[in-house]
Amino acid sequence: GQEARPGDVQLAGQPAAGARADAAMAPVQNIYGRSHLSLNGRWSYIIDPYENGFYDYRRQAFDASKSGKGGFYDDRKPKDKGDWVEYDFDRAPTMKVPGDWNSQAEKLQLYEGTVWLRQLFEADPKPGRRYVLYFGAVNYEAHVYLNGKKLGMHRGGFTPFQFDATAALKKGRNVVVVKADNTRHQDAIPTVNTDWWNYGGITRDVLLAELPATWIADYKLQLAKGDARRLQGFVQMAGASPAQKVTVSIPEAGVTFAVQPDAKGRAVIDVPVKPLVYWSPQQPKLYAVEFSGGGDKVLDRIGFRTIETRGQDILLNGKPVFLRGISLHEENPLIPGRLRGQGDMRMLLQWARELNCNFVRLAHYPHSEEMTRLADEMGLMVWAEVPVYWTISWTNPDTLREAGRQLTDMIERDRNRASVVVWSVGNETPIGEARNAFMGSLVRTARGLDDTRLVAAALEIHRRGRDITIEDPLAQLIDLASFNEYAGWYWASNAEMLDFRFDIRLDKPVVVTEFGADALGGYHADADTRWSEEYQDRLYQNQFRMLSGIPGLRGMTPWVLADFRSPRRQHPYFQDFWNRKGLISDDGKKKEAFWTLKKHYDEVEKRYG
Ligand code: GCB
């Protein structure tokens, strides 16, 4: 049979294709704004390291056999007392969805492989309506079955996907079964080696959404690039009769206009607009926006702002801004595990606000849609990134396609979020011909999809004697001189680092995307003692002194908001599988350096406003 390419959403009965075969199956814009049933809650699970529920004893996939039966997705029960069935979801343990599995059972903490998850739900499908089964994210490969029927598979651990569930959905009780597999692969995005925990499972919301026969599949509404007096974007209709007029209105701003989609359901938006209240961290204004047409209606809350660079300045709504940022993972150190809901997300963004940040780097992969919506609401600008991290398989075209797919899915999902100001195509990737071509292709993909935001990447520095330089050709293609720089930790010590100078010859705003030091919360010593809060604190102070020598410095996102788990971090006492570069420890306590960074940001704010 035909193999789905990595990252593609493949539907039962449809051939795999490089791009999505059917535009209607692209994730629906603003899924939370549709009528839907949440399938979150406790799901039964079966740990299946040998993929016993997927392959028979000759290693043939059950779902590729003639009957398609035999896999755990049948959710079979013994027919009578003599029947032979070796699995039983009804008597299996349960775990929370959304939620990584590693944090929910001791057996699963270090597990990499297949886990089957099952949920039961009641439905009452109405004729003429379309039903889609939506997943916010499953890490990494998901096979999805509804009432024993395969809906499709998806690869990629941090982007949403959905399947048409209309044909398989029943009145009454329904069974959804997911085979989730978090095995790492060299050719995947990310690859085998990262500095974060490979959390498996259904880590974000699962929804069953209901759509009318013709629906508003996608839209973008933003200010035009560098022009606060024009709204631009598009509307994409799908379903039975997509060429129906769509009305867009922003009642509070007195804006209403209509667009006429073509036969493919596409309509371009390009209209002048009176001055609006522009979105900014000081005033994160969101307007209620209504799209209606073809019998469908969607409400969204959208902020309007411009973001651009001019020489070494970053201009937000035309005014210079300094990005007072912090990097963060999608992890709650108190669980510890992936964020499970809005409360967790609010806690992290609130910590960022307490640091007096106006910017967050959502490292190193797309965080959830709820997170960027919350950033919109809380007034935090966002750097959004794809997990093109370290040593990707640069020469494999499938790997590039997968990276492009994840980047596309992230941009398509979040392009109405005013908070998102930077698309990042990767982190600390090693310079080389194949890699330069790969990254260049991602930059073009990002620009092709969205010309209203900055495109960047977290680069690496070079040292020439005492000079710190940027020599990466990728720097020419992106909008920021953005790099990670570990003076005082991976090279030089607190005592030595001040002997180094920056020599950055790029006429672009400089944003230092990482620096930092491990400190075990509560461990106190002098500033020359590794792992102490004092060492980390001194390193921050020294960094501010070093960075003040960069004339074009326009922002930073130190590494990192909170301690996070990483299998690479082996020191039995100071780390114990934790990266300790957090400004907040795994018990939620602020370390000394937290207050030093806050004080610094208070001063920066006085200078820049
Ligand atoms: C980096 C990486 C980040 C790591 C960090 C570290 O440069 O971008 O993912 O966690 O350094 O702590 O070494």
Image (cartoon, rainbow, N blue to C red):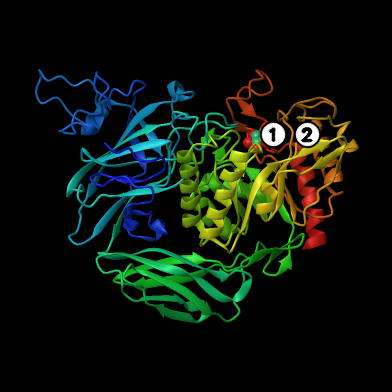
> Quadrant of residue 323 in the image?
bottom right
Q: Quadrant of the N terminus?
A: top left
Classify mark 1: residues with Cα within 10 Å, few (<14), some (14-19) or many (20+).
many
Q: Amino acid at mark 1?
A: Lys
Q: Is residue 529 left or right of residue 478?
A: right
Nearer-N-terminus badge (2/1): 2
Where is residue 87 shown, x and y percent of the image?
A: 24, 23
Drawn side of residue 372 relative to residue 135, left or right: right
User: Which residue is more in the foreground, 467 or 175?
Assistant: 467
Q: Residue at x 10, y 26 (%)?
A: 79
- Where does ligand 1 appear, by image quarter? top right
Q: Position of residue 220 (x, y in %)?
A: 47, 65
Assess mark 1: CB under 8 A from ligand 1? Answer: yes
Residue 35 seen: yes
Query: Where on the picture, by quarter, is residue 560?
Result: top right
Q: Name the disc covering residue 581, or none.
A: 1
**Would you place residue 484 above or below residue 222 in this image?**
above
Q: Cβ of disc 2 within 8 Å of ligand 1?
A: no
Q: Residue furthest right?
A: 499
Distance from label 2 to label 1 (Cα)?
8 Å
User: Residue at image x 51%, y 49%?
Assistant: 407
CB within 8 Å, label 2 to label 1? yes
Q: Secondary structure at mark 2?
A: helix
Mark seen at residue 159: none
Q: Residue shown at 71%/48% (left/top)?
A: 482
Indicate the quadrant where residue 589 lies.
top right
Q: Please tell me how crowded label 2 is: few (under 14), some (14-19), or many (20+) other residues with Cα within 10 Å.
A: many
Which element is circle 1 on?
Answer: loop
Q: Examine the rendered structure and indicate whether residue 402 appears above or below residue 255.
A: above
Which residue is the site of mark 2?
536
* Camera-nearest residue between 250 and 500: 500
